[in-house]
Image (cartoon, rainbow, N blue to C red):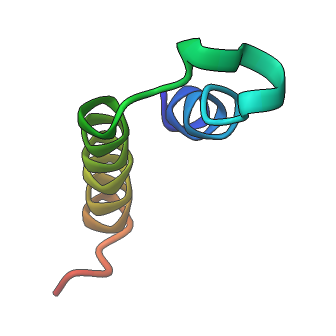
Amino acid sequence: MPFLAVTLLYQNNRTAWVGRLRNGWATNVVLAVSLLLFLVLLASQLDLLN
């Protein structure tokens, strides 16, 4: 899932690729928050937060 979030952030913000259908600011925020959540969960799983 983190790979999907990164891929969507990259590909759907390229105007040359998707034209006027690119992500809006709300979609970018949701994808960035989900990516941040996955990173926090990874750090928690690896016991890096203690």
Question: 33 and 2: which one is in front?
Answer: 33
Q: Is residue 24 above or below residue 6?
A: above
Say how many tags the image has.
0
Question: 28 and 32: which one is in front?
Answer: 28
Q: Quadrant of residue 4?
A: top right
Spot the residue most to the bottom: 50
Q: Quadrant of residue 42?
A: bottom left
Q: Is residue 43 above or below residue 25?
A: below
Q: Is residue 40 above or below residue 34?
A: below
- Residue shown at 61% from the left, 35% from the top: 13
- Residue shown at 31% from the left, 40% from the top: 25
Looking at the image, residue 36 sits to the left or right of residue 50; the answer is right
Spot the residue most to the front: 20
Point out residue 43 in the picture as x, y percentages from the top left corner. Answer: 34, 68
Question: 26 and 46: which one is in front?
Answer: 26
Q: Is residue 1 above or below residue 45?
A: above
Looking at the image, residue 31 sits to the left or right of residue 10; the answer is left
- Residue shown at 16% from the left, 87% from the top: 50
Looking at the image, residue 4 sits to the left or right of residue 15; the answer is left
Spot the residue most to the left: 50
Point out residue 48 in the picture as x, y percentages from the top left corner. Answer: 32, 81
Point out residue 35 in the picture as x, y percentages from the top left corner. Answer: 38, 47
Looking at the image, residue 50 sits to the left or right of residue 34; the answer is left
- Residue shown at 67% from the left, 40% from the top: 10
Point out residue 8 in the picture as x, y percentages from the top left corner. Answer: 58, 27
